Every structure is written in C-alpha cells, then in structure tokens.
Amino acid sequence: MKNYRIHSCLRPMQKGWRPIWLINSAGALSLLLGACSFTPQETGTALTPPAAWKTAAPQAGWISADQARVWQAGRWWALFGDAQLDALMPQVDVSNQNLAQAVANVAQAQALLRQQQAALWPTVGASASANRAGGQDTATTHSGSVGLNVSWAPDLWGKLGDAARAQGASVQASQADLAAARLSAQGSLAQAWFALREADAEMALMDDIITGYERSAKITQNRYDAGIAARTDALQAQSTLENARASRVALQRSRALSEHAIALLVGHAPADFSLPVAPWIDTVPAIPAGVPAELLLRRPDVAATERAVAAANARIGVARSAYFPQLTLSGGIGASGSNLLDAISAPKMLWSLGVALAQVVFDAGARTAAVDQAVAAHDGATAAYRQAALSAMKDVEDQLTGLQTLAAQVERTRAAAAAAAGAEQRILNSYQAGLSAYTDVVTAQATALNARRSVMQLQLQRQQAAVSLVQALGGGWQAPWGQAG
C-alpha cells in the first residue's frame, strides 16, 4: 500500500483531532502563499503475504518464452492451443454488454476527475446587455454595457486538491474494475467453451457406445427369439440401450446451455448464434503462479479495493478542511454607454476587486460528524482491501490444489477405464459362450461407460481449474500505477 504524506498547515493531525485555532490577519496572509492538505499518512493497510504458495504449482515455469509473452500480453487463452477459442475471444471486447458498462463507468469517473481538477482554476464570465426605457411623458433612453468577471477560491486547505486526488484514485479503481470485468467475461467464455467441446466429445463417445449397445440388443433379441436367452436378457439389453440414448439427450441439453452462455458473453441472442461440432482440444497449459506478493499487483479486484482505500484516505483531508475559512477572490472590468455599440467603441470603464472570507461558526457538530464518517469509511475500505487480498490468495491456493489433485485423478481414472473396458469385453465373450448371466454384462458395460465418461469430465475439470487459476492470478494484468501492497 502506498504511503501518503501529510502536509499540515498548523500541526500534525491525528484521528480524533479537532481544530482549536485562532488565525490573526498576519497569519491568514502568510497562509495565502501556499495550500495545505490534511490528508493523513496511510498506515496499517499493507499485508505481509507468505513467501510461497502452500500448494506447489503442478507444472513449474514456462515451456517457452513465447508462452511467457502471451501471458504478459493478457492473451492467456492462447496457451490452451485452441485456434477457434482464440478467434472467438476478441468478440468479448467488442460486444459484451457488461464490459461496455464497465467502460462507461471508467469514462464517467474520468469526467468527474476533470470536474474536480477544473475547480482548482478561476472561473471567468462575460456579459453584455442593452436596455431601452421610456414612457408617455418620458423621453426614451438607451443604455448598454459589457463586462468581464473573474472569481477564484484559492485551495488554501487542500480541499479541492484532496478531492481531485480522491477522484483520481476512483478513476484507477474503475479502470481496475474494467480489467476485472474483462477477465471475468473472458474466463466465463473459456469455461463455457471447454464445457461445450467436452459435451461434443462425450456425445461422440455416446454415439459409439449406442452403436455397440444396439448391436448387443439385436444379438440378445435374436438369442431370445432362438430360445437361447431369457426374456429378461433382451429387456435388460434394451433398457441399457435406452439409458444410453437418454444420457446423450442430456448431453445435448448441456451443450445447448453452454452455447447459449457463449452467445450472451459475445453479445448475441442465442437464436442468432450457433457453433458447429468440432474436436475438443483438452490441453492443460502451465500457468505461472509466481509468488503471493505479486498477486496484489496482478488481481484487478484487489487493486480496485486498494485504490478505494486511497480515495477514502484523501476524503478525510476533504472533511477536515471544512473546519477552516474559505477565501474567495473576485474581480471585474466593464464598460457602459448610451447603447451597446457605444459601450464597446467608446466605453466608460468600470472595475472592481473583492475579497471575501467565510467561516462556519456553529454547525452543531456537523463537520465533526463528517470527519468521523470519512475516517470510518477509510477503516471500512481498509478492511475490504485486506479481505479481498486474503480471498485472492485463497483462490489461488484452491485452484493449485485442484489442479494437482485432478491431474492424479485423471491418471487413476484412465487406468480404471482401461481395466473396465477389458473386463467388459471378457464378460461379454463369457456371456456369448453361455458362461455368464446378462446381468454381469450390464454391470460391466455401465462400469466401463462411466469410467470413460469420468476421464473426460475430469479432464474438463482440469481445464476449467486452469482457467480459474488464470482468473485467480489476474490473467497477466498488472496495476499500471505504483506499488499496491
């Protein structure tokens, strides 16, 4: 967390400080020479993250320098090696409406910052008037005038400067929110994309299985018709086939829902968007976990909360400045004549200079309450920042653990699937030789099918865990401002 200097005009200001002051005319004039700021120095926000992750990354380092450059460029999805996903992802920036809303929020924050900065400068106004007056027994008269007026309230106590700094931090927070919205949309798109492609692969598996079950059902029916097999065998074979067909229908529904989600993420109505069946690239790339301390600069949501702390800190200075008088300087120059043209060409010049000093004498504790509110808001923002940082570290640990355990699960399940496929074939051969009951065949088929589908589903979970790890690490994004932790 950044440390902010305190520029105190009278003495250091601590939490709970209340100004008891008397400014004489000489002191007031001396203070005109330079503005002050009552923003306190930021303390107590920084965290001390651990030196390393509790769970080691399943794959250390990078395979190539090219992949490192892809990560640093924020194109993390290219690490999965899917050209179709790579082509689809840019549509998120173009058409995603949540992202468009975040872009608008940044523009709004930037406009507010320009308003705050403009308040530091004098305001200049111009006027022109022409009048004609008369009556029944009164000669008609004409008059005209032009004028130029200047007004300026010097930022003696840093109120305007602190407000501008607070809004500047809010702009940075909104930029981090935009990055977080972009990363969220990109991650959701990748998750839905892999789910869709896994559904395609699983449906292809089910098509092969259904073809085999249809063959088995036909053979069993023929054996029943020939009096070799029992009626229950034929019914069980048909039941197994129908269950497989029902599973395929469920996969079609899952694929459709993933396709609808992708359509929404790229800004299309589901009815106008479709993706053809394509092979599933089930690559799980190496992801650079780095060290925990780097996370505070890489996670947009954490950076946004840190900037909220900075903004809240500056608003304490804004609230404290209300204890002091406000000085306003004004000046004007004008001209008048018998008409507007005379006022411009042969004017009677008029000028004016003014100074005003305004101070609230009694407000029943309103300013004190405002300072207390600002301090409490800062404390709340600090707690939110710490919680966001801790949650971010937990997210990374969760995904590292998930990737590590899923990799082991996939290997074990592949071995189980191979063994189940061998057992299925042996039991089927045994049944056809009249040595086994058909219930054994049904059990072996269900076991083999479930194991093969489990391998695919676990591999999908690995890919989705890798995407979640990318999101937990910030997707290669880094706060463009100074140190955040």
Image (spheres, rainbow, N blue to C red):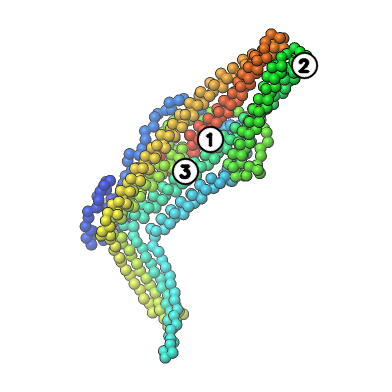
Farthest front residue in view: 231
Q: Amino acid at mark 3?
A: Ala
Q: Nearer the viewer, residue 391 or 331?
A: 391
- The Cα–Cα distance between marks 3 and 1, rounded to whole angstroms, is 18 Å
Q: Amino acid at mark 1?
A: Trp
Q: Position of residue 318 (x, y in %)?
A: 34, 52
Q: Residues within 10 Å of mark 2 (few under 14, many from 20)?
A: few
Q: Is residue 259 left or right of residue 388?
A: right
What kind of element bears circle 2? helix
Find disc 2 in the rendering and name its residue. 225
> Which sits in the foreground, 136 or 350?
136
Residue 350, position as x, y percentages in the image: 36, 76
Q: CA distance from mark 3 to mark 2?
A: 71 Å
The residue carrying mark 1 is: 71
Write the residue at 26% across / 56% down. 364
Q: Is residue 70 visible?
A: no
Tag 2: residue type? Asp
Q: Which mark is residue 176?
A: 3
Q: Quadrant of the N terminus?
A: top left
Q: Residues within 10 Å of mark 1 (few under 14, many from 20)?
A: many
